[in-house]
Amino acid sequence: MLSGKLGHEDLRRLETGPIERKSEGPRSAKSSLPDFLSTVAVDFAGVTKSYGNKVVVDELSFSVASGECFGLLGPNGAGKSTIARMLLGMTCPDAGTITVLGVPVPARARLARRGIGVVPQFDNLDQEFTVRENLLVFGRYFGMSTRQSEAVIPSLLEFARLERKADARVSELSGGMKRCLTMARALINDPQLIVMDEPTTGLDPHARHLIWERLRALLARGKTIILTTHFMEEAERLCDRLCVLERGRNIAEGRPQALIDKHIGCQVMEIYGGDPRELHSLVKPHSQRIEISGETLYCYAPDPDQVRTQLQERAGLRLLLRPANLEDVFLRLTGREMEE
Amino acid sequence: MIEGFAAALPANAWNWVAVWRRNYLAWKKVALVSILGNLADPMIYLFGLGTGLGIMVGHVDGASYIAFLAAGMVAVSAMTASTLETLYSAFARMHSQRTWEAMLYTHVTLGDIVLGELAWAATKAFLAGTAITIVTVTLGYAAWPSVLYGLPIIALTGCVFASLAMIVTALSPSYDYFVFYQTLVLTPMLFLSGAVFPLNQLPETFQKIARCMPLSHSIDLIRPIMLDRPIAGIALHIGVLGLYALLPFFLSMALFRRRLMR
């Protein structure tokens, strides 16, 4: 009931069909989408989880509409992976309710998982199997017969750009190819919802762009995606909405650009190469706010030229003026940097 | 909580087959090496001890020593094969390879995985035990066709030791702990279960301990079958083996749930 059988034929079409979301920047607001897409795919209400005395997820509430890409953004240890596990019913919350695709989780997690595809942070492909065998074996875990799997494998290989590697062993694939295969594997049950835990961590830039492009192709296909990441650029590029997590709490939620506008609202001048404390007093009069991190001074200035003039006579300083980003938002909200 | 534990039980009667087939596919790629590896150890014991000690011992309970030992080695090979599969290979799939994690994203439950792994380990035990049975029959140390009744017992022995090892796998933080189970549990069991010498020459206390050990029940079934003699207390032996297969299975599922679904 949860997995319509339209998907795999359409998957092929998506290769050639127009991809609606071509822009590299943040995508348009949710309000522009038709009503039928705005049903709730995932809902967390007051979810709490602790291990011993350590609260990992703290009164967390958020909901994800069908067809959107929702980001869970936070540093390591913010609770992202625990949230992903709870969503799959692999961890039981201590309090609160979770609904996934209209089904209560963890009570009926197995039914919910029928409509979910998972791309984990660490590859757990079968290294000794070929690409095709990996897909076949994974299909069996969903109760798919060999014939059923074989019917969809060509379109999955095409999606993963692995047509020529069908009979190669996983151990022979590059990191990017493995991640593509993991994505293809997550699609074998034609899920409505795809959970991606740090999908581009550890990949080289080329592979990262390929994954982003494939991910957008899935969104164009109407899939709902939940993405956890500590990677700001990724969140800004891909997510319709996101929630910023700190120690398991939802400290801000909204569209990436809206969050940036709301919490920063101006350009940022990064200054380094001098004593940050001394520079601080120098540029203070012209700044809305200043943050010091290591040897770098982040100066949030409505009029950056004034700051520039102020610093003109100082030798050896390097100035970088850039648009505000989510990292600044995080820094603003938590007073600390998003660390890897 | 009850809901939680239900999630760890097998979802239905057939889901585990997908897990079994995954392991079978992986094994098929290295089948020959694996069979030879599983055969070598018990064969060396059988012929090393059988011929060497056999000269000194002569006959045991009216059978040649090597024929006496053969039944023990069949049971021990089943024990070893399923134990090693469950300890090292299943642990790798759970821990370092994260294969179980991938399975848990699907329709397969934790109980299905444990059951599939158990069935797979029992399959390997069955292959190992059967291979040695074939050798002993061919060399005339076991009675044909009575020996065929031993095959289900070999499979049951495989289930028992997979089930027991599953507890160790569920509890071990790393591979390093397996050796304790092997040296402190399995090796003493080998000597206390009548695999290499008859139990009736042991002190009464040791004989009582032996009565509690699954391997001795397995050997008490396999030996008369292979020597084509009447078996005493079939129901008791099968009952004990059945309990040793079932109880650790459920216990290990509870332990795995605590470990993997925190």
Image: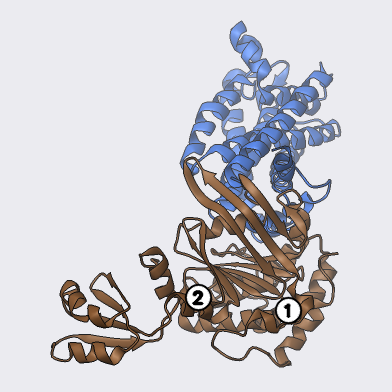
Identify which amino acid the numbered label 2 is placed on: Leu
Question: Amino acid type of disc 1?
Answer: Gly
Place of residue A18 in the rendered image (x, y in percent of width and height, measured from the top left):
71, 93
Q: Which mark is residue A222?
A: 1
Chain the render paints blue: B
In the rendered image of the structure, the colour used to display chain A is brown
C-alpha separation, residue under disc 1 versus residue under disc 2: 25 Å
Subunit under mark 2: A
Q: Residue at x 76, y 65 (%)?
A: A115
Look at mark 2 in the image and give the residue it sits on: A259
The image quarter in which residue A6 lies: bottom right
Category of crowding for the residue at label 1, using alpha-carbon neighbours closer than 10 angstroms: few (below 14), some (14–19), many (at least 20):
some
Q: Give the vertical position of B133 relative to A303 (above or below).
A: above
Please name which of the two marks, 1 or 2, marks the residue nearer to the observer: 2
Q: Chain of mark 1?
A: A
Mark 1 vs mark 2: which is more N-terminal?
1
